[in-house]
Image (cartoon, grey):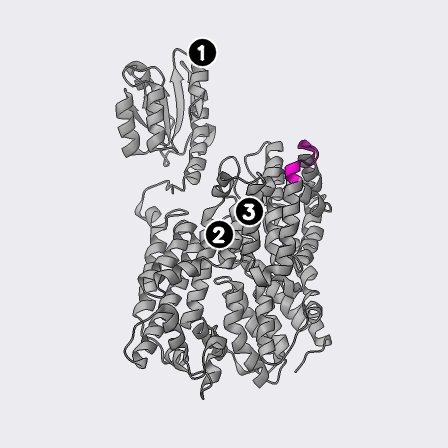
């Protein structure tokens, strides 16, 4: 925008003027054109509909009283074909009744002729801002200048240049010949002379004696083959395809080349189209327990927010947060330690809506449209604090249980108390570092500098009065759900209990189907695609190949001691876990590094725990952990629908937090207090 409220000339925002009075229309067109607008004008509703379909104006200035098709009829038709377009209604026959009648429809503003030009400009610019928000709600990309460069670079949700690059990279992986090492890995027999090569295969324990990964994969994918050599080459090709899928998905999710839900569906399309798994295999890979968990948590969050119970929970957990500084430096360590023993995903789901409520109240109270730095600071402090609670105890996540199982395969039993001894001291220190990062980053970037989060939550809670019957019912269901997650997840998983809780809330009359249908389904599909991709990488042997390349690239100094191997492996896993589930990362790397630790005469426990701890550092990608996915889903402006925290925000800030997490792990844990603790050899 230029000065004096005029739009920049090079933007030439397009306005459609619809009025049957030729003199008024011609005069208004000239005055708006002089102010920098690209003005289209028409004298009837029928032609206005055609113009909107083909010319895509941002704002329509529409006369209410016209012959044949009047303004209200035209308005209804325009909204059917372009719901995002903003309508400013004009009439020379105004009055209270006309305003009331027009106000029943989806209209941005109502102005009476004659309207001063400055007032008209003010309304047009406000309507243009609302048009952007409507575009976001409708997921319609907007490119300011239609040059080839701008088209190629695109906008969030449609970046043709990145799409072309992704297609080229996928084609490169597809047509590249399989390496000898990949062929060797998928053809090594369990129990054979090269058995140690495939100990990193995720399904190693399911292999029969003498069976090779290619044969196991053939049973899973129902591959047809004539000879074993043909099968091995087919399996190697599928592994390369999955690497290509990983590259394309990571590229599209990181850059926003297509909407995240579309990228999530693309993963399944590629896996199906190129025969990585049969149709039933692709659908089952998408419909995992973790996906049902994500879906259930988002729906449960809607129920908690609907009843007002989130405000009560917020009062308890956010009580110390009397300022942004205290929220970062005191609340973050507290919530991180809590996340070590309770479901970190549930904590995110309960507190994030409360913080969004505080944020929306703060910007409305401050008289501003938004404060992006504030919402990023608040929600990502919570998110990353919960992420780094993962190493605190075996109860913090399935990845920890997977690692305990691997160590047990080698005759090493790690008790709950031992894990806490090795891992819990990391959690509050790392959470304090997370909070300090956000405080130093955000203290001078936020528009709202002083915010008593605790008091804001209490005010919001006071508005709704004492607890209702629905709140008590929801609280009981919530408590039972947390107990089920803590005590029964090994039997029923994490998804089963939360689905049961949703059914219970519906029977109790609290959660209705429209509440469930209104959740952010793109996030559910996003995590489903990550689960399917992780499974495809694991079962084809692609993940084993990636791990093998990494391990063989390590210098001897990094593999000759437990410290060196722990540092190297944690760096690799910390990066890898951003692109596949934490459990899949541990499942792929754990069996490789434990034998390496044994050969290096180092403690497998040290190396195994370092591997598992680093799988909690999935900070940079939305798909890295359910925590990220839930935060992304909830970080939307309630009024405009604008996505307040973007994929790019996760990548930019998450990369920094990941580096800080690795540094704390290396210097505070591996080179620090672990040197004082006993480790089994």
Q: Mark 1 and mark 3 in contact (Cβ < 8 Å)?
A: no
Q: Nearer the viewer, residue 423 or 369?
A: 423
> Is residue 676 part of the magenta span, yes or no?
no
Q: Earlier in the sequence, mark 1 or mark 2?
A: 1
Q: Earlier in the sequence, mark 3 or mark 1?
A: 1
Callout 2: helix, strand or loop?
A: helix
> Mark 3 highlights which residue?
502
Question: Which label lies toward us, 1 or 2?
Answer: 1
> Is residue 467 part of the magenta span, yes or no?
yes
x and y percentages locating residue 476 in the rendered image: 66, 46
Residue 631 visible at all: no
Residue 367 is left or right of residue 333, and the answer is left
Callout 3: helix, strand or loop?
A: helix
x and y percentages locating residue 255 in the rendered image: 43, 54
Using the numbered discs, state the Cα–Cα distance from disc 1 to disc 2 in whole angstroms.
48 Å
Q: Mark number for residue 95?
A: 1
Q: Mark number for residue 648?
A: 2
Residue drawn 37% across the image and 79% down it: 183
Residue drawn 60% across the image and 76% down it: 407
x and y percentages locating residue 498 in the rendered image: 56, 52
Residue drawn 41% across the image and 39% down it: 138
Using the numbered discs, state the Cα–Cα distance from disc 3 to disc 1 in whole angstroms.
49 Å
Using the numbered discs, state the Cα–Cα distance from disc 2 to disc 3 in whole angstroms.
32 Å
Residue 70 visible at all: yes
Span highlighted in magenta in the image? 462-471
Query: Which corner quadrant of the image does residue 236 belong to?
Result: bottom left
Question: Which label lies toward us, 2 or 3?
Answer: 3
x and y percentages locating residue 91 in the rendered image: 38, 15
């Amino acid at each position: 925008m230029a000065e004096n409220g005029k739009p920049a000339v090079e933007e030439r925002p397009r306005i459609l003027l619809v009025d049957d009075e030729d003199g008024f229309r011609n005069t208004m067109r000239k005055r708006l054109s002089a102010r920098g607008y690209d003005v289209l004008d028409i004298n009837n509703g029928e032609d206005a509909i055609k113009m909107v379909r083909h010319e895509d104006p941002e704002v329509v200035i529409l006369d209410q009283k016209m012959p044949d098709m009047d303004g209200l009829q035209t308005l209804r038709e325009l909204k059917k074909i372009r719901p995002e377009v903003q309508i400013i209604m004009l009439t020379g026959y105004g009055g209270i009744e006309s305003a009331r009648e027009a106000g029943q429809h989806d209209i941005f503003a109502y102005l009476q002729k004659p309207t001063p030009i400055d007032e008209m400009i003010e309304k047009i610019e406000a309507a243009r801002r609302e048009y952007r928000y409507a575009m976001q709600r409708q997921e319609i990309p907007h490119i300011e200048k239609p040059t080839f460069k701008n088209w190629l670079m695109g906008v969030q949700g449609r970046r043709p240049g990145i799409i072309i690059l992704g297609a080229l990279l996928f084609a490169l992986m597809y047509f590249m010949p399989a390496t000898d090492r990949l062929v060797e890995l998928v053809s090594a027999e369990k129990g054979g002379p090269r058995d140690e090569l495939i100990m990193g295969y995720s399904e190693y324990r399911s292999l029969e004696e003498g069976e090779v990964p290619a044969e196991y994969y053939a049973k899973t994918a129902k591959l047809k083959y004539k000879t074993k050599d043909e099968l091995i080459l087919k399996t190697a090709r599928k592994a390369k395809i999955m690497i290509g899928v990983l590259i394309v998905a990571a590229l599209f999710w990181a850059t926003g080349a297509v909407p995240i839900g579309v990228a999530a569906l693309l993963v399944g399309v590629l896996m199906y189209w190129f025969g990585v798994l049969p149709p039933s295999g692709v659908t089952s890979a998408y419909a995992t327990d973790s996906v049902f968990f994500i879906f259930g948590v988002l729906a449960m969050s809607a129920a908690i927010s609907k009843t007002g119970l989130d405000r009560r929970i917020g009062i308890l957990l956010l009580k110390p947060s009397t300022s942004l500084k205290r929220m970062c430096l005191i609340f973050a360590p507290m919530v991180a330690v809590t996340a070590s023993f309770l479901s970190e995903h549930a904590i995110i789901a309960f507190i994030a809506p409360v913080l969004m409520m505080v944020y929306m109240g703060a910007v409305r109270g401050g008289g501003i449209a938004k404060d992006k730095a504030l919402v990023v600071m608040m929600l990502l402090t919570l998110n990353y604090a919960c992420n780094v609670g993962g190493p605190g105890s075996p109860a913090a996540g399935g990845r920890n249980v997977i690692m305990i199982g691997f160590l047990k395969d080698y005759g090493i039993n790690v008790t709950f108390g031992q894990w806490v001894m090795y891992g819990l001291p990391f959690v509050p220190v790392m959470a304090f570092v997370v909070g300090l990062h956000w405080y130093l980053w955000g203290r001078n970037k936020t528009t709202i500098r002083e915010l008593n989060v605790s008091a804001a939550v209490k005010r919001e809670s006071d508005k709704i009065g004492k607890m209702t019957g629905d709140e008590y019912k929801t609280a009981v269901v919530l408590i039972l759900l947390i107990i089920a997650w803590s005590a029964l997840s090994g039997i029923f998983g994490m998804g089963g209990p939360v689905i049961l809780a949703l059914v219970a809330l519906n029977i109790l009359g609290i959660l209705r189907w429209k509440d469930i249908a209104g959740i952010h389904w793109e996030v559910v599909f996003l995590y489903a695609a990550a689960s399917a991709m992780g499974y495809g990488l694991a079962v084809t042997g692609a993940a084993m190949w990636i791990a093998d390349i990494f391990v063989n690239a390590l210098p001897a100094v990094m593999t000759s001691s437990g410290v060196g191997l722990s540092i190297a492996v944690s760096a690799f896993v910390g990066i890898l876990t951003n692109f596949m589930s934490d459990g899949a990362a541990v499942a792929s790397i754990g069996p490789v590094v434990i034998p390496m630790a044994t050969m290096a005469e180092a403690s497998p426990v040290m190396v195994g725990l370092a591997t598992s701890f680093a799988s909690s550092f999935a900070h940079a990608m939305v798909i890295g952990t359910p925590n990220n996915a839930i935060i992304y889903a909830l970080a939307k402006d309630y009024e405009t629908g604008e996505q307040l925290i973007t994929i790019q925000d996760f990548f930019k800030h998450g990369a920094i937090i990941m580096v800080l997490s690795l540094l704390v792990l290396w210097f505070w844990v591996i080179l620090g207090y672990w040197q004082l603790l006993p480790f089994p050899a």
